[in-house]
Image (cartoon, rainbow, N blue to C red):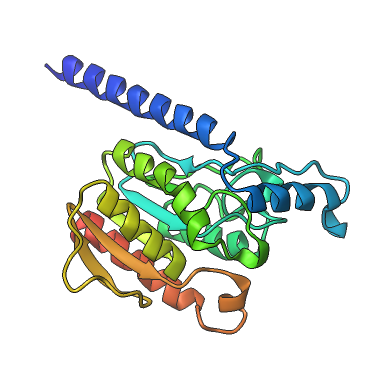
Amino acid sequence: MMLLYLSTCILVYLFIMNALQELNQTLTACERCPRLVAYRQRAAREKRRAFRDEDYWGRPVPSAGDPRARVLMVGLAPGAHGANRTGRMFTGDGSGDFLTPALYRAGFANQPTSTHVGDGLKLKDLYIVAVCHCAPPDNKPTPQETANCRPYLVQHLQRLRNVRVILALGKIAFDGLLAALTETGIEIPTPRPAFAHGAEYRVGACTLIASYHPSRQNTQTGRLTEAMFEAIFKRVDSLLNGR
C-alpha cells in the first residue's frame, strides 16, 4: 500500500509540474499587450548602464517555485531591469534583495540571495506568480493589461492544488488576485476584502494575507520594514503548522 501511495504522489507531482511548465511556455510567448511588449523590448535593448554587457530576458517572466507549494505568493510585475533582465521573478533588483533574505529566514528558500537564474536558488513550499508578467512603465500596468494577464493567474490557481495560504504583495496584486479567484468560481467574502498590510481573510479553502509590496519605494521609506515582513511570514508559518 505504501508503494502504491508513493507512486501516486510521484505521478501527481509530475502531472502538476508538467502542467505548470506548459503554462509557463505559453505565458512567455504572450503578446496580448502592445504597450508592454514595446516597453519590455525597449528596456532590453537600451539596458541600464550597470548591465550593458548582459543579455536581457525581455519577455514575459514565467512563474517559479515548488509545484507542491502550500504557499502562493502573488506579486505585481517584473521590474524593467530586474526580472525583465534576469528572467526570474524577484531576481536582480531591490525588491528581490529585500524579499529573498526574508524567504530564506522563513525557510522558503535555500539561500538568502537571488541574482540570476543560475545562482542556485530553490524555493521550498512556495510558488511565485504575478498579476502582470511583463514589465510595465513606472511599475504600473493598466487595468486592461492586468485583465489580459488574468487568465494565466486563473490557470495557476487551478493547477496548484496544495495551496493553503495566498500572500498578495501590494494592492494591485491583491485586487487582481480577488478577480482571478472570482473567475475560478470561489466565493469572495462579503463585505469584499479590503487591502491593508497584515489583513487576513478566509477565501474558499485558503487564507489570504495582504502585505505591502517589497519595493524600494516602500522599504527605503520605512513603510515596510524587515520586522513587519517577518511578522507576515511568522503568521504564514502558524497557519501552515498550527502554531
Query: In front: 164, or 147?
Result: 147
Examine the rendered structure and indicate whether residue 134 appears above or below residue 222: above
Q: Residue at x 17, y 66 (%)?
A: 189
Q: Quadrant of residue 56?
A: top right
Quadrant where the N terminus lies? top left
Horizontal side of 231 relative to 129 (left or right) equals left
Q: Residue at x 66, y 41 (%)?
A: 59
Q: Is residue 208 visible in this depiction of the protein?
A: yes
Q: Quadrant of the C terminus?
A: bottom left
Please say if 143 is above or below 148: below
Asked whether, in this view, residue 197 is left or right of residue 38, the answer is left
Q: Where in the figure is residue 10, as x and y percent of width and height?
A: 30, 22
Which residue is the extreme one toward the left?
A: 1
User: Is residue 115 visible in the rendered structure shown here?
Assistant: no
Q: Measured from the top left, where is residue 121 in percent x and y?
A: 57, 44
Q: Position of residue 92 (x, y in %)?
A: 68, 54
